[in-house]
């Protein structure tokens, strides 16, 4: 028998409890975000210090006199003590000032805001493909464990794990673009469609829909589909594999037996009860997958000439454009922090146990 | 007590594994009327497997064989998954050991009860909800409206087991198999849950199979007792006369029970006789 106090404690309205736990979580995650961000800037700052590129030399050139060199060195504050330099760097970063890019000679932040939506568009569609196909595949593999469905799905996952993405990209272009002509080639748009739609949020598919330019949308979509599918295949491989093992663990639980014992169809037991519990674990996996998609974008964007963050980072690296590299690194770090926050907020929605903490 | 709800004759369950076959249940026979039948035995004696075989829940690696396996007038032998699905919950249901694990943690308990109703009676959401609330009241839960929206982790063990009983009885089965229904509960709550279950089973004229390793519980609660050892029934007797059981295994179990006020340093160990298995090996 439950004691009256225990019953009373649990009687707080569920909506209020949810709001309060959300507030608690937000405070806690804001604190951890601040700490993580501090760590991140520490890392990028010290990378900037130890990397064998002399920022003064990059400005004055190697024919400058010793006085000029010393003057510029003092101007950009490299003669100050390290902690002071870090503090100045931190203040700048917090204000969104990553300095100017050497290649584009524009502020790095400006460049990042321009290239990031292209990557986001790619990664979002890739994630959608990975989750929409990967979760059902994982479930199917688990429910048909050891049978041919399982073997096929595991083989496909393994392939997705082990194929280098640039190779898949090249083969994909060769087959689906050059041979079959099913999709459009590299880049985000055909030249003929350039500059028709003014950027609103920077994702061409969405901007063109908002502007009602459906021809542009379809062109952009067919350009997007192949690189997104190839990236999506990577996340599918991971998501399917994790879903399979989570599902196998859930199917061994007693509540599955109880659900069968009350006469539910195996279909309902798997897709409603067991999968409902699998989602709790999948939230983190999907957030991490999204992060790794941003990293995977570096190679994919290079192969597909996709003007996103990955291509920008690659070009900056090859041209020793330190400000741009560090700025992009901070951005990727910030995205990871954001993903963690989002998954923290999603938890209570899929897991009632998380609402009560 | 007259009409037979369940008839089992020479039921065997065999699991085929990598190291050959394991015969978990060997030639078990019994009938169940509108009564309370206890099945006792040590771990691995096949009592749970017997219960699950009747519900068709033994898994794909198991083979079931029987000369007779009849639920009312339905022959359960060779019944497919679809056929069993109609029976489970509606004709025969099962209460499992620990509500902490046997309720879905991410669905509210009310919805889990209503789900059984919707599945079998094809009822609307509102009807199922009303039936679930009535059922919660029937298992003596105060304030069913509030408990309906609670999740399994928010209810106590005793309350969880009453939810489980409600979930299993809402579609009106004839038989309830209770597999160690109170082993995970506090001692103080055990009798209460048993009383609620007994009350419902009697008032609905159901048959109950109580599977337990607890001899005291079974002898005080049931009408008849089957004693199982190594997959076979070694003895059947009236619960009240369990203390006069003849089989050496049952006698051994009884002798191994600790007694209040008896300050014995060591309980006698059960001496197993290979001959107990010889007749059916």
Image (cartoon, rainbow, N blue to C red):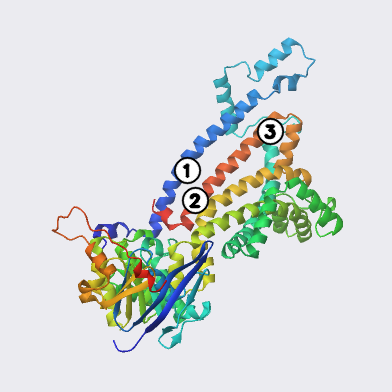
Q: Which residue is found at the position 57% from the left and 65% from the top?
A: A143
Q: Residues within 10 Å of mark 3 (few under 14, many from 20)?
A: many
Q: Circles 2 and 1: CB distance less than 8 Å?
A: yes
Q: Residues within 10 Å of mark 1 (few under 14, many from 20)?
A: some
Residue B197 visible in the displayed image: yes
**Residue B160 falls in which quadrant of the image?**
bottom left
Chain letter of the residue carrying label 1: A
Q: Mark 3 points at which residue?
A: A325
SS for callout 2? helix
Measuring from the top left, give residue A50's x and y in whole percent. 64, 23
Q: Distance between the residues labelled 2 and 1?
A: 9 Å
Chain letter of the residue carrying label 3: A
Q: In this view, does A153 lie to the left or right of A225?
A: left
- The answer to whether marks 2 and 3 sit on the same chain is yes
Q: How far apart are marks 3 and 1 (CA)?
A: 27 Å
Closer to the camera in the image, B63 or A263: B63
SS for callout 1? helix
Q: Distance between the residues labelled 2 and 3?
A: 30 Å
Q: Which residue is found at the position 69% from the left and 48% from the top?
A: A162
Q: Which residue is found at the position 57% from the left and 24% from the top?
A: A86
What label sits on residue A29 in the rendered view? 1
Q: Name the residue under label 2.
A: A345
Earlier residue among tags 3 and 1: 1
Measuring from the top left, give residue A235's x and y in whole percent. 65, 52
**Residue A314 falls in which quadrant of the image?**
top right
Earlier residue among tags 2 and 1: 1
Residue A204 visible in the displayed image: no
């Amino acid at each position: 028998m439950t004691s009256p106090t225990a019953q009373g404690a649990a009687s707080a309205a569920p909506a209020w409890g949810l709001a309060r736990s959300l507030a608690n979580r937000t405070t806690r995650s804001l604190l951890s975000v601040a700490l993580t961000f501090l760590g991140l800037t520490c890392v990028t700052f010290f990378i900037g210090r130890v990397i064998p590129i002399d920022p003064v030399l990059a400005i004055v050139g190697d024919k400058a006199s010793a006085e000029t060199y010393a003057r510029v060195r003092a101007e950009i504050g490299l003669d100050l003590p390290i902690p002071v330099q870090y503090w100045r760097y931190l203040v700048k970063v917090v204000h969104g000032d990553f300095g100017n890019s050497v290649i584009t000679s524009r502020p790095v932040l400006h460049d990042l805001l321009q290239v990031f939506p292209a990557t986001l568009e790619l990664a979002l569609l890739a994630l959608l493909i990975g989750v929409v196909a990967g979760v059902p595949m994982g479930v199917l593999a688990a429910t048909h464990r050891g049978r041919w469905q399982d073997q096929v799905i595991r083989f496909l996952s393994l392939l997705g794990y082990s194929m280098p993405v640039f190779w898949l990209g090249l083969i994909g272009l060769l087959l689906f673009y050059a041979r079959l002509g099913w999709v459009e080639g590299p880049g985000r748009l055909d030249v003929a469609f350039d500059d028709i739609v003014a950027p609103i949020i920077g994702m061409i598919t969405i901007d063109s829909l908002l502007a009602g330019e459906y021809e542009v949308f379809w062109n952009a979509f067919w350009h997007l589909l192949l690189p997104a599918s190839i990236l999506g295949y990577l996340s599918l491989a991971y998501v399917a594999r994790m879903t399979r093992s989570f599902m196998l663990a859930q199917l061994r639980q007693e509540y599955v037996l109880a659900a069968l014992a009350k006469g539910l169809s195996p279909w309902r037991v798997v897709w409603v009860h067991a999968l409902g519990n699998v989602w709790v674990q999948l939230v983190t996996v999907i957030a991490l997958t999204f992060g790794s998609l941003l990293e995977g974008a570096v190679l994919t964007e290079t192969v597909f000439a996709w003007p996103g963050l990955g291509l920008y980072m690659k070009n900056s690296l090859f041209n020793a454009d330190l400000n741009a590299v560090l700025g992009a690194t901070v951005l990727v770090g910030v995205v990871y922090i954001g993903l963690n926050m989002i998954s923290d907020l999603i938890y209570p929605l899929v897991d009632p146990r998380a609402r009560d903490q | 007590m007259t009409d037979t709800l369940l008839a089992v004759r020479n039921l065997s369950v065999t699991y085929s594994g990598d190291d050959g076959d394991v015969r978990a249940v060997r030639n078990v026979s019994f009938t169940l009327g509108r009564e309370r039948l206890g099945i006792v035995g040590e771990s691995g004696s096949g009592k749970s497997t017997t219960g699950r075989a009747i519900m068709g829940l033994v898994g794909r690696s198991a083979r079931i064989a029987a000369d007779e396996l009849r639920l009312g007038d339905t022959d359960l032998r060779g019944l497919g998954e679809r056929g069993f699905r109609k029976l489970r919950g509606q004709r025969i249901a099962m209460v499992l050991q620990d509500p902490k694990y046997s309720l879905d943690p991410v669905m509210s308990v009310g919805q889990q009860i209503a789900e059984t109703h919707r599945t079998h009676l094809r009822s609307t959401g509102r009807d199922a909800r009303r039936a679930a609330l009535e059922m919660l009241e029937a298992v003596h839960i105060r304030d069913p409206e509030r408990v309906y929206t609670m999740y399994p982790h928010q209810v106590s063990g005793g309350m969880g087991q009453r939810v489980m009983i409600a979930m299993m009885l809402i579609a009106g089965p004839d038989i309830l198999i209770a597999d160690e229904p109170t082993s995970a509960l506090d001692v103080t709550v055990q009798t209460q849950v048993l009383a609620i279950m007994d009350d419902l089973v009697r008032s609905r004229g159901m048959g109950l199979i109580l599977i337990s390793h607890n001899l005291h519980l079974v002898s005080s609660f049931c009408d008849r007792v089957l004693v199982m050892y190594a997959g076979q029934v070694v003895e059947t007797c009236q619960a009240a006369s369990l203390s006069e059981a003849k089989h050496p295994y049952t006698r051994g179990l009884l002798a191994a029970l600790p007694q209040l006020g008896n300050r014995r340093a060591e309980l006698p160990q059960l001496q197993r006789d290979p001959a107990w298995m010889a007749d059916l090996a």
